[in-house]
Structure formats: structure tokens, C-alpha cells
Amino acid sequence: AAAEKAAAEQAAAEKAAAEKAAAEKAAAEKAAAEKAAAEKAAAEQAAAEKAAAEQAAAEQAAAEKAAAEKAAAEQATAEQAAAEKAAAEKAAAEKAAAEQAAAEQAAAEKAAAERAAAEQAAKISLSVKTAPEVGEYLTLIGSARNIVNINLNNAQSGFSVAYEGYYERDNYQHQYNFKSKVNGKGVVFNLANRLNDIEGGVQIRLADLTTSTESDKVRLQSKTKLTSVIGYGGYYFDEFKLYTALGVAKARFNTKIDGQAPTSMNSHFSSTGIFAKGGISYTQPFGNISLKEYIALSYNNLGLGELTDSNGDKIEVSDKLPLSSEVGVMVDYNGELWNFNAGIGVSYDLGKLQVRYKDTDRNYSRGTGKLKFNLDLGSSYKLAQHLYLTQDVKLALDSNHYQNAIFNLGVKFTW
């Protein structure tokens, strides 16, 4: 019984030990399980936190990338807008410049067309109406001025009377186109005397001229009666001679109109002017032959003044510098019965004979810087004691269309 009791106690003790061991094992396993669960939970939490952190980082990176891309897109858009704006402004500026250039070109073309039309209209007006009458004014006064002159190089003591014939041709080609011609005749009286080294005299000229000026549709013909009185004097010293002249001339004009187009040319008008001349000559004698060189300056304002035509328009005939210079050389031969002289020279018109319609810009001129070549051929034949038959031819021409000739035939009584 004790053995059984001991066995029972031992069995109970072993059972208790076994239960305790089982309980401890269960507790250990439970603790291990809880630890494992805790570690797993911690690991899962760490993983979750890591994933959350990585997701947050990814989202932040994505946000930053999106922001950067947005900023880049906005910058690109702004740059594109600026470029488009600049291009638009450039295009607008180019368009404005092109439009301005086109407008300026159109204005220039319009002005050129208007100017051409005005010039054409003026040309038509001139060729139909104004050209002949302007040319007639210029020709009338110009030819009268050419005749009012005096040759002081070979003046001699005595009295002479001579018949003169006049011839002149010219062709005007400026804004107008017309031709003019002059024919005429006259008589010249000359009285001179020399006392020692002093010489003095007077010349009187009466001339009748017929002038015609033609264009396509108008022909004007005028008669000019010219009277001039010129006094002159000279002083001799050694081989030199100083001479001067001063006089007055009056021209009366009567115009006849023949043509299809109207003209406002006056049928009657007149002009009065002053003539003056001064110069010096040098003579070198070689037996019966002498060589004479001369230079002179003349002033002739015949025709200067204001006219009123038949329409009531004021016309000014003017010359700011009515001067002409001349230089030349002459050879004289003095024989018992015959005397001959021949001269050649040039003259230059310093001024410009001009016809202008007052209060307008229409003006027309003749003789601007006209350089003329002059030829003088003369002779005299002794008819009786102190009585000579004289003749002289004076020619003048320029490089264009101007031609002028004066023929002189007379008698001279010397003392």
C-alpha cells in the first residue's frame, strides 16, 4: 500500500511535472508566437511605413517633375507667345513699311504724272499760243539790240551816209519750238572830227525791220521802226586808242497775227533804251598795212520794261546783266585808191534777255551766255579828193542756229 501510494504520488508528481512542462512549453510557444507576431507586425509596419515613405517620395518626385514640366511648358508657351508677338510686330512693321513705301511710290508716280501732264499741257499751250508771241518779243527786241551798235575801231574824221541791209535767223528749242527770221534796211549818218589826240562824233541810225516768228499753228509778223542816236569820243596816245560811246535808242513795233490759234500779242508797242560802250585798241603799223587789236564792253538795255498784252496780262522784258564783251583783231591796208580792212573776233553776251509773265513762273529767255563769232570785211574806193565809196559786211553766228549779217554801202567825205 505504501508502494502503491508512493507510485501514485510519483505518478501524480510526474503528471504535475508533465503538465507543468506542457504548460511552460505552451507558455513558451505562446510567447514565441506572440514575439513572432509582434516582430511580424513590426516588420509589416516598417514595410508599410517604408512603402508609404517610398510612395510619398515617389509622389513628391512626380509632383516636382510635374511642376518642372509645367514650368517648362509655361516657359515654352511664354517664349512661343513672345516669338509669335515679335513675329507679328515684325510682320506689322514690314507691312506698314511696305504700305508706306507703296504710298510714297504712288505719291511720287502721281506727282510725276501730274508734272508730266502739266509740262505737256504747258508745252501744248506754248506751241499753240504762247511760244510764237514770246519768241516774237524776244526776236523783236533782240534783233533791235543787235543793230544798235557802233564800230569804234576804224572811225575816221569826216561825214558819211550809208545804206544798210539786215539779215538774221534763229531757231528756239526749249519748252517750245519755233523759228524766227529778220530782214530789214536802214540808213546811217556819221559825223566825226579829230583834233590832235582827241576825236569825237555822232552816229544816227534809222532802220525798218520785218520780223516773223512761226510755230505749228501761229505765224506772227512785225514791223519795227528803230531810231538811235549815239555820241562817241576817243583819245589817242602812242599806238593806243581809248574810246567810249553813249546813246539812246527807241523802237516802235507793229505786229500782224496770222494763224489758227489765238494770241494775246500786242499789235502796237514801243520801247526805249540806253546804249553805252567802252574799249581800247592797239595799232601796230607796217608801212601801208596796220594790225589793230581791240577789246570792248557794251551795255544795251533796249526793250527793258513792262508791257500789257491784249488780254490785260503784265509781261516783263528784262535783262539783269545787259552786257556784251568783245575782243578781236583787224588788219587795214591803205593804198592810193583802195583801202581794205578785215577783222575777226568773238563776243559774249553776259546777260539773258528774258520775257516773263508777271506773277507767274512762266519765263522764256534768249542769249544766255551766247558766244558769237564775228567777221568784218570792209573796203573803200577813192572817187575824188576827200570823197570815198565805202562798203562793209559784218557777220555774226554761234554754234547753234543763230546767224546775223549787216551789209553797209555808202559814201564818205573826209577832211
Image (spheres, rainbow, N blue to C red):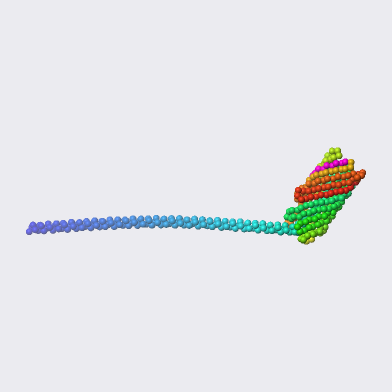
Q: Is residue 243 magenta?
A: no
Predominant secondary structure, magenta span? strand
- Give the quadrant of the N terminus: bottom left
Is 236 above or below relative to 35?
A: above
Residue 269 in view? no
Residue at 22%, 57% (x, y): give it: 29
Q: How many marks?
A: 0
Say which residue appears at 65% left-offset and 56% top-offset: 108
Residue 152, horizontal then vertical, whole percent: 84, 46
What residue lies at 14% left-to-right and 57% top-to-bottom?
14
- The image quadrant of residue 196 is top right
Q: Position of residue 241 (x, y in %)?
A: 84, 42
Q: Is residue 165 left or right of residue 27?
A: right
Q: Which range is magenta?
A: 326-335
Q: Is residue 7 left or right of residue 81?
A: left
Residue 124 in view (yes/no): yes
When the figure is inspected, residue 69 is found, relative to residue 201, above or below; the finding is below
Specify the farthest residue to the top. 287
**Based on the displayed image, in which of its 4 quarters is residue 60 positioned?**
bottom left
Q: Is residue 331 magenta?
A: yes
**Quarter placement of the C terminus:** top right
Residue occupying the far right of the picture: 385
Horizontally, is 276 left or right of 75 in the view?
A: right
Is residue 115 placed above or below 385 in the rendered structure? below
Residue 132 % position (x, y):
77, 57
Front residue of 26 and 353: 353
Residue 32 screen position, x and y as percent: 24, 56
Please state which of residues 10 and 249 is positioned toward the viewer in this rendering: 249
